[in-house]
Each structure stands twice: as structure tokens, then as C-alpha cells.
Image (cartoon, rainbow, N blue to C red):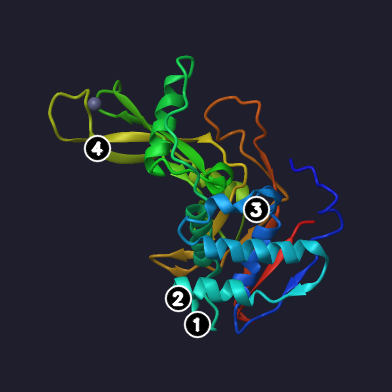
Amino acid sequence: MVILTNEFVSKGFSGLYKIGENSYMNAVLQSLSHLLPLTIYLLTTESSKFENNKNFDITKSYIHLISELWRENVAVKPTSLKNHIANNDECYKSRSEQNAYVFLIDFIDILHESLLRKKIGIQSTEFSSSHFRKAQTEFLDNVNHHQSIITDLFYGQYLKKYTCRDCQQYTYYTYQPFKELNLVCGNFEKTSSVEQLIKVEFEKDHIHSNCAGCSENYEREHEVEIKIFKLPEILIVTFNRFNKFYGRNKYSVVPNETLDFSDFVFTNTDESVIYTLSSIVCHSESAGYYSIVHRG
Ligand SMILES: [Zn+2]
């Protein structure tokens, strides 16, 4: 929960001018700007310590933009930020619409690498559980020991338990980090709720891999149980409407005001497992542009 300081009360109604066909960019920037844990961090942290980081010029321009957006309720031109982004990546030089999802992931990666803190090692103590120590090791290896406000806020971790179906004895675990939950919409008729799609994502799966418990050295079928080891503070959910067999699905997803993850987490925890919707970025096929619905 974010306690709003006076600077944020009655603010947040600022708009962004279109520059060419850049609604994909504006919709993503607006939704990120309304994620107050990130915005407050960016507006209140001494940024000079990040100045030598890669792409900090882009983040500096974004910080300037959100300071304008939250100063008063006005319309702002994101020209400087758009130019910085275009100079860094040819894809964004074009004045035509791009994919908002791809831009969101690219922009979050830029924020991450520009806001890296000093490398840190394993923080676990002798009292930490074996899962915690292994999860922390896998997480730090995955991000190359580089952490930032982005890994703090947006990264979660799966816990996958693999059990050999032949010997039924040997199990192993992985703790893969994630920064988005990508849900496939193609498994239901016409309309589905986000909960239904999440249930499908967390159904048991099967893979083939070597088993250290079985004597012969060839791949065995393993059952995979999927849980969430660590929920991110801010969860990005994306909906994949494309199916390699049927092309674009004509399904719709009913958004939820809240999402309860208590069935999908690995351990009981005192931390909240209920997310409250912040905003939805949607694409209108008929109009050809993106818009954002923000839940105030
Ligand atoms: Zn086995």
C-alpha cells in the first residue's frame, strides 16, 4: 500500500500529447507513471549516483516527464523522452504505432539497467530455509547480481517442483525469476476471467529430463508442479491472443478489480497475496490505437 503524500493527492490527471502515432508509448508511460512506488522512488532518490549507468539519459528524461505530469494537472509533450528512446533504439524512430507490450518490456529493461545499484552477494543467514538460499542464489545469478528498484518492485519468482514419474522419489526444484505473467487466451470459449487464465497457467505440466535417482542415463518424464515462491510488489499481466495454430483468437478477457493469488503461492505468508488493479493498456483494432484505463 502506498500512502499518498500531499504532492500526489488530487494530481495524476495530466495528459500526454500525441507525437505522430505514438499512443503505444503514451499509454505505457501513463500506466507506469501511476505506479506510485516507482514514481515516488524516481522523484525522491538522489539520481546523481546513477549518472554513469547505461542509458541513464533516458531515465533522466523520464524522471523529468513524470515530475511535469505530477506537478499539476496539465498536458505534457513527451518529445524529449521520445527522442532519447529513438536515439537508443532504431525501432522507436518511426512515427507509426508500435506494439505497446514490446515497448513496456524494453522500457522497463532500460529503467533497470540505468538504475542499477552496487553488486551485492547472498544475504541469507544460517537460519534461512534451504528453499530461500537456493532461490536467492538462482535469482542473483539470473540478474547477474545486478539489482535495482525494478527488480525490487517487478520481479517475482516461480518455484517449480520436478518429480520423476519412473522412480517417484527423485525431485528437484527451480526458482526462475519472472517480471510478467503472460496468459494465453486461447483455451476458453469467447470470454474468460483472468482467474481462469491464471489457473491454466498453474496447472501441472510434464517435461523430459535426466533423473539422478534412476540408474540408466536417459531422459525420464517428470511431473512439474508450479507455484509462486515470491510475488512481485507490482505484477504485470499480459494477455497473449495469438495461437500458433489458429492465429489471432477472438476472445475477450474480463478484467478483475482484484486478483487473489493465495492458491498459487508456495508458502503461507503474512504478505498480501491480493493485487488491486492499477491500469489496463488496451488496443483498439478498429481505431488502430492504444488507450489506457486507469483505476483511480
Ligand atoms: Zn527417476
Upstream in the sequence, badge 1 or badge 4? 1
Residue mark closest to the camera, 1 vs 4: 1
Look at the picture and state if 51 lies above or below 222. Answer: below
Which amino acid is tagged 2? Cys
- The amino acid at mark 1 is Ser
The crowding category of the residue bearing disc 4, from other C-alpha atoms within 10 Å (few below 14, some 14 to 19, many at least 20), is some
Query: Does mark 2 have its CB less than 8 Å from ligand 1?
Result: no
Question: Which residue occupies the foreground of this view, 51 or 183?
Answer: 51
Q: Quadrant of residue 121?
A: top left
Mark pair 2, 4: CA separation: 38 Å
The residue beneath circle 3 is: 42
Q: In this view, does 214 lie to the left or right of 244?
A: left
* Up-down relation of residue 286 to residue 282 (above or below): below
Q: State the residue in front, 41 or 97.
A: 41
Q: Quadrant of residue 289?
A: bottom right
Q: Read off the residue under disc 4.
A: 209
Task: Identify the residue shown where x is 55% and y is 79%.
Answer: 97
Q: Which amino acid does label 3 sit on?
A: Leu
Q: Residue at x 70, y 78 (%)?
A: 17
Pick whichever of labels 3 and 4 is earlier in the sequence: 3
185 displayed left or right of 37: left
